Image (spheres, helix red, strand yellow):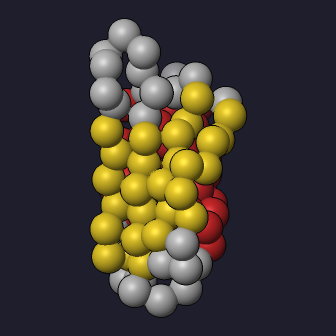
């Protein structure tokens, strides 16, 4: 996975996630909306065969980079919990 920053301002960040598709982009978008400082979070994939999501994150205060990092940490915790639940059920 490679992140390409396309545009960065004080409260706005636009970037592409190379090598990923809707799965990661949608999970990140949804988790970003749980942050009260995030005023906009969305993504688009211009062509389904190319599959490069372009994400836009805007914040009312604080850095969009911080909001993204925090959202990723929350997603890691959620995924770890899911993994443990699956392990318990598969025994």
Q: Residue at x 31, y 38 (%)?
A: 44
In this view, the residue farthest toward the top is 49
Residue 71 rendering spot, x and y as whole percentages: 53, 62
Residue 73 rendering spot, x and y as whole percentages: 62, 60
On the picture, is 78 further left or further right than 80? left
On the picture, is 20 further left or further right than 41? right
Give 1 or 74, whichever is nearer the viewer: 1
In this view, the residue farthest toward the right is 2
Q: Residue at x 61, y 50 (%)?
A: 5
Q: Residue at x 31, y 27 (%)?
A: 46
Image vertical order of residue 41 relative to residue 54, above or below: below
Viewer can see residue 81: no
Task: Say which quarter of the image contains residue 70.
Answer: bottom right
Viewer can see residue 3: yes
Residue 87 rendering spot, x and y as whole percentages: 58, 31
Give 27 or 20, whichever is nearer the viewer: 20
**Screen quadrant of the N terminus:** top right
Give 51 or 88, whichever is nearer the viewer: 51
Give 12 or 26, whichever is nearer the viewer: 12
Count of number-bearing discs: 0
On the picture, is 3 further left or further right than 50? right
Task: Say which quarter of the image contains residue 56.
Answer: bottom left
In this view, the residue farthest toward the bottom is 61
**Screen quadrant of the C terminus:** top right
């Amino acid at each position: 996975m490679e992140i390409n920053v396309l545009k960065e301002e004080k409260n706005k960040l636009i970037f592409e996630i190379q090598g990923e598709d809707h799965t990661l982009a949608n999970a990140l978008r949804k988790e970003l909306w749980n942050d009260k400082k995030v005023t906009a979070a969305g993504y688009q994939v211009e062509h389904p065969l190319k599959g490069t999501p372009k994400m836009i994150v805007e914040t009312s205060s604080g850095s969009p980079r911080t909001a993204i990092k925090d959202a990723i940490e929350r997603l890691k915790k959620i995924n770890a919990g899911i993994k443990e639940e699956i392990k318990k059920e598969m025994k």
